[in-house]
Amino acid sequence: MQNTLAIMAKAPAMGRVKTRLAKDVGPVEATRFYRVALARLIRRLAADPRWQTVVAASPDMQALPDQRWLQNADAVVPQGEGDLGARMQRVFDTAPKGPVVIIGSDIPDISARHIAQAFKALGNNDAVMGPSVDGGYWLIGQKRMPKVLMPFENVEWSSGRECDQTVANFATARVSMLNELSDVDSGADLAQWRGRCG
């Protein structure tokens, strides 16, 4: 049994990533931000020996002409088809035995401390979630024992209700909530993040 951290990530190609941010800062700057933030996130988290870091990539690897952004991951798996819930469920269903934590790739403030807190929470809980300011979540994890839970049915993605709906789907399972974090979806978000980074 091992701890598995899965990072849901898109290939950093212009026009495919951070499209809302691109409306404020332009597609070149939005893509550059995503490329740099993603590379730093993978490098930072994959260096920690407490878990195996897997990138769940979209599009599937065969369609990726440049795979340098994946070089620090322990493994790469395809996200596959379907909405976000179907793709995350696939990660929960197919990962090696042991607890699994899934994060997105557009919250640059995620640290190894956050991931360690999530795996620690799974010691006494069935699931763990990290809510985001916009009503979604930046992290979701499952102990996967005695069974893999299925929390994504009828979740309305990009509605601002994703976190509440997913928690409700966990029903009687014990769910631990982590601190709220913000993603970078607008020019104002980007300016705030750069201000925090100095």
Image: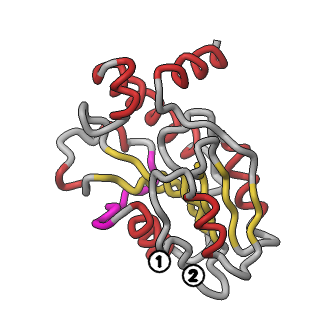
Q: Would you place residue 66 above or below residue 59 in this image? A: above
Magenta stretch in the rendered image: 73-82
Q: Which mark is residue 93?
A: 1
Residue occupied by mark 2: 148
Dot 1 and dot 2 residues touching (CB under 8 Å)? yes
Q: Residue furthest bottom?
A: 146
Q: Position of residue 175 (x, y in %)?
A: 74, 69
Image quarter of residue 101: bottom right
Q: Residue at x 42, y 72 (%)?
A: 90
Q: Residue at x 58, y 49 (%)?
A: 138
Is residue 52 at least partly visible in the picture?
no
Q: Is residue 76 magenta?
A: yes
Q: Which mark is residue 144?
A: none
Q: Residue at x 25, y 35 (%)?
A: 13
Q: Would you place residue 94 above or below residue 180 in this image? A: below
Q: Position of residue 42 (x, y in %)?
A: 49, 41
User: SS for tag 2?
Assistant: loop
